[in-house]
Image (cartoon, grey):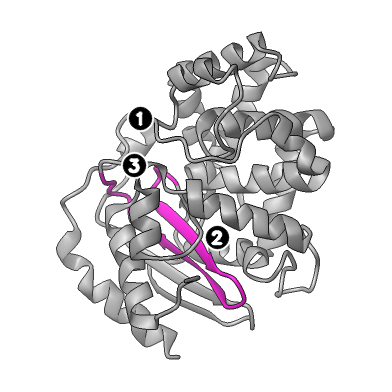
Amino acid sequence: MDFQKILEQIQEDTQKYFGIGEVANYIPELAKVNPNQFAMTVATVDGDIYSVGASQQRFSIQSISKVIVFAMALEQIGERLFQRVGKEPSGSSFNSLIQLEQEQGIPRNPFINAGALVSTDEIIKNNKDAYEAILNFVREVSLSADIDYDFKVSSSELETADRNRALAFFMKSFGNIQGDVMMLVDVYCHHCSLSMTTEELSKLFLFLANKGVNPLNGQRVVSEYQAKRVNAMMLTCGLYDNVGSFAYEVGMPAKSGVGGGITGVIPGHLSVSVWSPELNASGNSLVGTKALELFSELTDLTIF
């Protein structure tokens, strides 16, 4: 399959969708991003990389990092993680307090904010330096040693993180947050601020397309069982309130972030990342979603 030609066609066909969405303006640093940008990368389990657009430009991955901390926590403590976080789509806002109260401080899944805070709490508990552990994981799996946090973005997020602090304190009142809340939110804002390119993200997610093994160096990242579970969670919970439509139109496990990125996998074949900062009403990249719909249509690659 000529992935390069397909990506070039997608880049051309998505031009008409620019100007419809809006950048994430509730985080001041993200509000400054030029909305008229696009990048897309396919990385295959055979080690081939195909890209179009600004695929070497780093951007804030935001909630895509929730997959990283979930995979790390699952690898470190296994199924015990699900004593603290559920496995179901939320059907509510990604930062809902109401649902958390109704469910006694147990987040519905690892990809809403409360669930990611639980995963992050486990990372802090099980690692001497959580900031370093998360960064090392990303650098080692993506094979990009200079990936780093965007400290301007993390500072900007911390200034507007009152809802996340409220979620963490609320869960702590139920005994479901074990560490210091202020440090927890700080680590959380840092991993959301990770700055990566679409090429780096596609490489990072390849282990989920290859039964838990990074095909670029042969190293096992998580077990095959755990890779299946992460993919299942992305399929059912990875795209906020668009998760059903995305599964219907695109048909792949994926995770989005309000920085405009979306990364997905076709197990046994590839990972694909797209970035375009304008968001739809559900907080997913508008152009990126259209690009992945076209990718599914033009390649006929889905999990169904």
Q: CA distance from mark 1 to mark 2?
A: 24 Å
Residue 10 in the image: state x and y as whole percent. Answer: 29, 75
Q: Quadrant of the N terminus?
A: bottom left
Q: Is residue 230 visible?
A: yes
Residue at the image position 58 percent from the left and 82 percent from the top: 48
Which region shows up in magenta?
257-280
Nearer the observer, 259 or 272: 272
- According to the image, label 2 marks what residue? 201
Residue 135 in the image: state x and y as whole percent. Answer: 69, 46
- According to the image, label 3 marks what residue? 283
Other-residue count near label 3 (Cα within 10 Å), few / some / many at <14 / 14–19 / ≥20: many
* Type of amino acid at the residue the image marks with label 3: Gly
Q: Is residue 84 above or below residue 77?
A: above
Between discs 2 and 3, the one toward the N terminus: 2
Q: Which mark is residue 28?
A: 1
SS label for mark 1: helix
* Type of amino acid at the residue the image marks with label 1: Pro
